[in-house]
Image: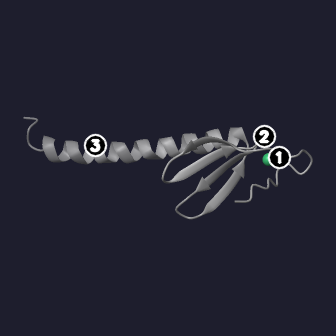
Amino acid sequence: MRTNCRMSSKSSCGPHVELTSNPAVRVTRCSCGTVHLHLKASGVSLQMDETQLRHVANGLVGATRLLDAAEAEVVVTKTGDGTMH
Ligand SMILES: [Zn+2]
């Protein structure tokens, strides 16, 4: 795997430190500070700084919370139907 880092043309890129890895995604941080987010399903690798990564993470958390809420709402609707009287 090539670990060239386009965002660090001036400074040299050292080894990447793995921040997290699961069956869907792998996140590493280059010694230059650039974060690499690799989506295993699509084989796409994204490069961003730490601030951008936080925004991405917050966005994903928000989306999954809505998904969880939607699922919970369906459950409530199914189990709570006609029992409020
Ligand atoms: Zn780098």
Residue 2 falls left or right of residue 21:
right
In the rendered image, which residue does mark 2 sit on?
31
Q: Nearer the viewer, mark 1 or mark 3?
A: 1
Locate residue 53, reporting x and y percent.
65, 43
- Badge 3 marks a residue whose secondary structure is helix
Q: Residue furthest right?
A: 10
Q: Pick whichever, 30 or 77, lies toward us.
A: 30
Q: Find the distance from the CA under tag 1 to the CA under tag 2.
A: 6 Å
- Decide: marks 1, 2 in contact (CB < 8 A)? yes
Locate residue 2, reporting x and y percent.
74, 59
State which tag comes first along the sequence, 2 or 3. Answer: 2
Locate residue 52, reporting x and y percent.
68, 43
In the rendered image, which residue does mark 1 sit on?
13
Q: Tell me which amino acid carries mark 1.
A: Cys
Q: Pick whichever, 32 or 14, lies toward us.
A: 14
> At 82% across and 55% down in the image, what residue appears?
6
- Badge 2 marks a residue whose secondary structure is loop
Q: Pick whichever, 52 or 4, lies toward us.
A: 4
> At 11% across and 35% down in the image, what residue appears?
84
In the rendered image, which residue does mark 3 sit on?
72
Q: Nearer the viewer, mark 2 or mark 3?
A: 2
Q: Tell me which amino acid carries mark 2.
A: Ser
State which tag comes first along the sequence, 1 or 3. Answer: 1
Structural crowding at the residue carrying mark 3, measured as other residues with C-alpha within 10 Å and reported as few (<14), some (14–19) or many (≥20):
few
Structural crowding at the residue carrying mark 2, measured as other residues with C-alpha within 10 Å and reported as few (<14), some (14–19) or many (≥20):
some
Q: Tell me which amino acid carries mark 3.
A: Ala
Report whether the residue tagged 2 is closer than 8 Å to ligand 1.
Answer: yes
Q: Residue furthest top?
A: 85
Residue 42 falls left or right of residue 5:
left
Name the quadrant containing residue 83.
top left
- Quarter of the image containing the C terminus? top left
